[in-house]
Every structure is written in structure tokens, then in C-alpha cells.
Image (cartoon, rainbow, N blue to C red):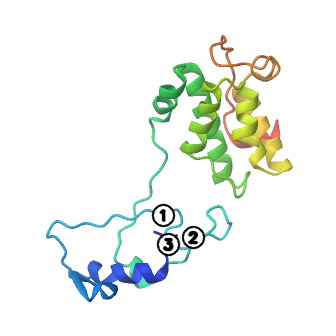
Amino acid sequence: MDCADPQTLSRIQPILEGESCIVTENEGEEILKHKNFRLFATGNTKGRGDLDNTFAGTNFLNASFLDRYSIFEMTYTKKESEIINLVLDDVDLSDKLVALFSLLRQASEEGILVNCSFSTRRLQDVAASLRAGDSLKEALDFDLTKRYEADEQKIIVQMIQDVFEASVYIKKKWTLGMEHSVALVAVSPTDSVTQ
């Protein structure tokens, strides 16, 4: 919703008021609202625009427009391991990737990583690269680390090493199907950065 053109959103406002929608471009056609009509909208900025450019192209939404909505904040699904395991068919690896993304998200929330987004979609891209035959290092480089600046990459690499034992997963170019090593997961992103 926060990427929508303001003129388009102004068309929705009468509907939210309980009125019908008039389409002037279609000879004033009136579209009546069904008695069970509901409108659900999604956005990444709560209608407040994007000050740090993580979600470029989003707009501030009109306050009176926002007044017509209740806002529910959604978190990442608790079933990410299951979703990733559908791609990888490797429970240990799926759990480790989700643990890595949890650390990265926490670092982003704490301001350790700024202007960084670690979505389920990005996690699925890493899994798809692994499924296609890339090594773990390649998948994490291409689909995660290389997207960020050098100082951010250092923090991300440290977190990767906290989840995946570097001597096994990184240096030996671990690929899907190889044996796993037990890895220590950092307690918090702050621990990762200060180690």
C-alpha cells in the first residue's frame, strides 16, 4: 500500500467510508460494495515512508487514509526452517540457515547492521543456490554477503562463521549432501561483532 500512487489511494477512500466507488473514466460507473467486503493492505513502513532507504519507493500515506485502518505488525514466520527444508531436504542445514538469518535480523534491529533486510525470500534464494549445486560459501556470497558494503560484509561474515564452522563449511567448500559439523551459534549479534 505504501508504494501506491496517491491518486489511486484516493479512489479507495470513499469505499472505506462505506460509499460506492465511482469510476469516472468508465462513464461514471458505480461499483457497489458487497455486504461482506473487507480490504486488507500490506506495507513495509506503516505508512510513514522510508527514512533509511531500505524500502525505496515507498511514500508517506495521508493521515486520514491511515485512520481508516487498524495496523497489525507481522514478524517472520516460525516455520522458516520447514519452508527452507522443502527446498534443501536437510534439516540441519535448514536450521543453521534460519539461525544465521535470525542473528542478522537481530543485528539489524539493534543497529549493528543498518539499512539491511534479511527476508524469507532472501533465505529461500540462498537455499535455491545450494540446491542448484553452489557451495555454501558461494551461495552466501552471491545471495547475501556481496549485497552489502565492505564494513557490513565483515559483520555478516563473522556471523556466518558463528553459525557455520569455517574450517568445514567455508574452507572445504561444503555443498548440499556433505556431512555436517556441529557449530556454535552466537548468543547475540553483539557477541559476534565483539569476538
Using a 10 Å C-alpha cutoff, classify the residue at mark 1 as few (fewer than 14 neighbours), some (14 to 19) or many (20 or more): some
Does residue 173 appear in this view?
A: yes
Residue flagged by tag 3: what amino acid is it?
Answer: Gly
160 w.r.t. 167: above or below: below
Q: Which tag, 2 or 1, sits closer to the chain's start? A: 1
The number of numbered badges drawn on the structure is: 3
Q: Secondary structure at mark 2?
A: loop
Position of residue 54 measured from the top left corner of the image (x, y, whole percent): 65, 61
Q: Which badge, 3 or 2, is on the more N-terminal residue?
A: 3
Asked whether disc 3 touches disc 1, contact meaning CB atoms under 8 Å apart, the reply is yes
Judged from the image, the secondary structure of the residue bearing numbered disc 1 is loop
Distance between mark 2 and mark 1 Cα atoms: 9 Å
Name the kind of residue labelled 1 in the image: Gly
Across and down, in percent, residue 149 comes to 82, 51
Identify the residue under disc 1: 43
Of residues 29 and 163, the one drawn nearer to the viewer in this rendering: 29
- Mark 2 closeness class: few <14, some 14–19, many ≥20 residues within 10 Å: many
- The numbered disc on residue 47 is 3
